Image (cartoon, rainbow, N blue to C red):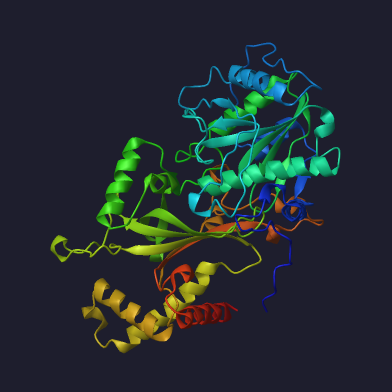
Amino acid sequence: MATATPRITKQRVYHFTTPRQDCDADMWAWRKEIDGRIVSMKASLDDFLHFFVHGSSDPPLLQAARPFNVPEGKRESSMYEPLCAGLREIVSDFPDATRPCFHNNAHEVIRFPFQKQEQEFHTTKPDIIASLPGQQFEGRFPDRWRNISTVFEVKNTVKGDPIEYRSPRNDETLVQLAKSARNILVAQGRLFVFVVGIYGHYARIYRFDRAGAVCSDRFNYQKEPSILRRFLWRLTHPTHQNCDILGADPTVRLTSTPSDQTEIEAALSAASIEHTEETWKTCRWVTVKGADDGAQLRYLLYDPIFINPGLFSRATTVWAGLEVDDDGHPTGLPPREDGTSGQPAGRQVIVKDSWQQLARRPEAEHYEQIYASISLRVLQSVADADARDNEVEGKAIANAWNEAWVGLAEFVAGDDLGAEEIKREVEDRVGQQTSTAIYQHSPPHQLYERSHSRTVSKTIGTPLSEFATTKEMVQALMDAIEAVRLRR
């Protein structure tokens, strides 16, 4: 029998006229969400780096004796530039392709990752930001969190450490860290992220995933700069060849170059999809395993339809996508002479990512069960199965699906990425399953962890924001309720 997930207060979504950043209700909800979910690990720094920052081997020994000369106990803003200088010094011998740059953000505003949702979520002001490996920050502001690898939140004394010293102000410090982690996770589709808290001459390293967070013991970065150096080296030297940074999802590729822009604009234009400069920056490619362990399917995601802003949650995101081939060209386009009449063409899909607790049945299994039932019905209804080719069978299944499940989008493919990863050797895992929830409960239980899943379905219906009549909207809501009933 299915049971509901315990109710946990989440940060709220407000109308754009609400002063969200200073909203007491929003801050209270954030505090409730992270309360008890960030655990200080009682382990040596060596063990913490080895287990939670599992990049490649450590860097060469640091040559600079004292790279950090940071004032303590003065205004926080006076610490920013000395910290940036020290951080630049400890990565100065990193290879060009993996060396991050550091920027004194000085409380400059960085907007929510996606323009489409920016009026629903307030801006944030991290103190120091680091770029993705090998990249530089161009222009005045970083690009909506899409090119930020980690952030450093600075407090001027050790009393600002929110793990050691609890107070309303320090709780807000922890919320700042959590918001930065959430924004990087959302902007880049990361599996987990790191942020650093600076407290006078001391620091902590935090690792956030979709189930919770862990942090290192506090250390003196002025006396032991090698710890931050080892952390940054491991962060920028992941072991997986398809990841540019530790915590990246190897099944996702973000846009970053002019050639990416050209390829995306060509694909969207060929499919008659309207786009702007912001669109191509938002886009990313994802790969999904085909049905029956078939060939990998590749999709260009171009429109974030829905984002669950929760940090420790299912974190559901829903994208409009376009199936593309290995060269980036849309598949399923009509013959050129047919035209598209300005309507989106090609194989349009909806791609949904979410993080389900291991105690839950993976969503893809529900679709696979329905698909198997319909496939069996089709096989039984066709007399000469040997004469049927894949295309004919596919059309027959699609027709049977639409007849049996009116209003339910047709399932195309799905991955339980966490379940697949757990079969691999530990050193080959990238974080498709969380690893922090186990430390929040006594006795520890693996079922509190979350598994990353992705489903692809065909498009159906009209967005609620674009319905033509009230009747049309009510019919859509009835279909959604029926789908939930079927899942239960």
Q: Residue furthest left?
A: 337
Image quadrant in which you'd find residue 155? top right
Counting from the top left corner in percent of width and height, residue 397 is at: 34, 78
Visible residue check, residue 329: no
> Which residue is found at the position 27% from the left and 53% from the top?
269
Q: Residue furthest front?
A: 17
Question: For this view, does 13 lie left or right of residue 337?
Answer: right
Counting from the top left corner in percent of width and height, residue 207 is at: 67, 41
Question: For this view, does 193 lie left or right of residue 199?
Answer: left
Counting from the top left corner in percent of width and height, residue 445 is at: 74, 58
> Which residue is found at the position 57% from the left and 39% from the top?
110
Identify the image quadrant of the C terminus.
Answer: bottom right
Q: Nearer the viewer, residue 303 or 323?
A: 303
Q: Nearer the viewer, residue 415 or 205?
A: 205
> Which residue is found at the position 49% from the left and 49% from the top?
115
Q: Nearer the viewer, residue 89 or 227?
A: 89
Visible residue check, residue 88: yes
Q: How many labels were placed on the picture?
A: 0
Counting from the top left corner in percent of width and height, residue 387 is at: 21, 79
Task: Give the vertical position of 121 relative to 373 (above or below).
Answer: above
Task: Give the vertical position of 368 relative to 478 (above or below).
Answer: above
Identify the image quadrant of the N terminus.
Answer: bottom right
Question: For this view, does 94 lie left or right of residue 219?
Answer: left
Q: Nearer the viewer, residue 438 or 26?
A: 26
Image quadrant in which you'd find residue 485? bottom right
